[in-house]
Image (cartoon, rainbow, N blue to C red):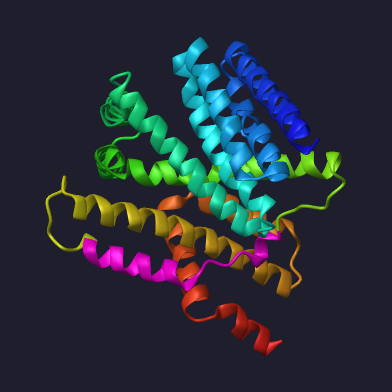
Amino acid sequence: MNDTKRITEGALMTGVYLLLLLVIIFMPIWFGPVLLFTLPIPFIFYSYRHGWKAGALMFTAALLFTLLFGPVFSMFTLLAGIGGVFLGGALYNKQSSLEAWAFGSVGFSIGAAGIYLASQFLFDINWGEQISASLDEAFTRTNNMLPGMVGGESTEASLEALRETIEFLPDIIPSILVMTGIVFAFISQWLTYKVINRVDKKQFRFPPFKEFKLPTAVLWYYFFALILTYIPTNEEGLLYLGSINVYTLAGSLLVLQGFSFIFYYAEVKKWSKAIPVVIVVICLLLPQILLYLVRILGIIDIGFSLRERIKGKK
């Protein structure tokens, strides 16, 4: 009976996934990307109900269907399926929300890397060249517009910073893939919680953002990678690419830690809930200066147990 129920539900969830995929394909281009975050929900829900092995079978069936009827669309299945099985399997094993998010992030990162590799080897798409070409075109347009609008040394400095960013982005594609996986895992998990809470009458939720705390190991990865970036190496070598990607990823997580501390501090000081939100928005609008300061705040929070010190003063 249980096997029959598992098979029936697996067929149903596979059908739901394929229906969502068809909707995304035929929806307007501005609306389709929004629905991408719903694609992993059938995989997460089924793996949460029946475990990662059953989820892997569902993923295999969905992948075969998309390969038969539209090989290009199997890219979506790679991302949604692998990430969904990882995340749903973690929920099946009673992992906490943050632990499930971590597992899901790994799965979605693997799926994103699978898309990257498959598109290069099967469809001959070089993402590094595509990104560089698109950004070079944007830089050329900006270069033609800014001098006539502003002019001066500040404009030249802005254009030079933009050019450095363009040259740097292809080097951190692995970090971009991982950050994509982290974002996909969070949004998909949040949406799936809504489904599970409604269908199974559960109370799944993420802990408050102010309680977010990275392990100390992230700090060591950051500093070790930072030291390696100052060692002269071949910019196309594995040491350079590895260190710059670890540095970028760990630095981004430390920014997240800094924002979490701001929310924690606002709660301790009984500030209005709008204040930390406004601070985050301002920091995102002025990233070159303020995000660096938020990263330092995250480093201090982890390295010097800043929250514990504040608790001790209360």
Q: Nearer the viewer, residue 30 or 123?
A: 123
Question: For the point 58% across and 33% down, which residue is it?
Answer: 57
Name above or below for residue 58 compared with residue 106.
above
Q: Could you say where residue 64 lies in the image, as x and y percent from the top left? A: 51, 20
From the viewer's perspective, tell me whether residue 269 is left or right of residue 27.
right
Answer whether residue 247 is magenta in the image.
no
Residue positioned 62% across, 48% down in the render? 89
On-image quarter of the N terminus: top right
Q: Quadrant of residue 168?
A: top left
Q: Is residue 253 left or right of residue 87?
A: left
Quadrant assignment, res 17: top right
Magenta span includes 222: yes
Bounds of the magenta segment: 207-228
Front-lying residue, 114 or 186: 114
* Image quarter of the C terminus: bottom right
**Location of residue 137 in the rendering, given as x and y in whole percent from the top left corner:** 30, 23
Q: Residue furthest front?
A: 1
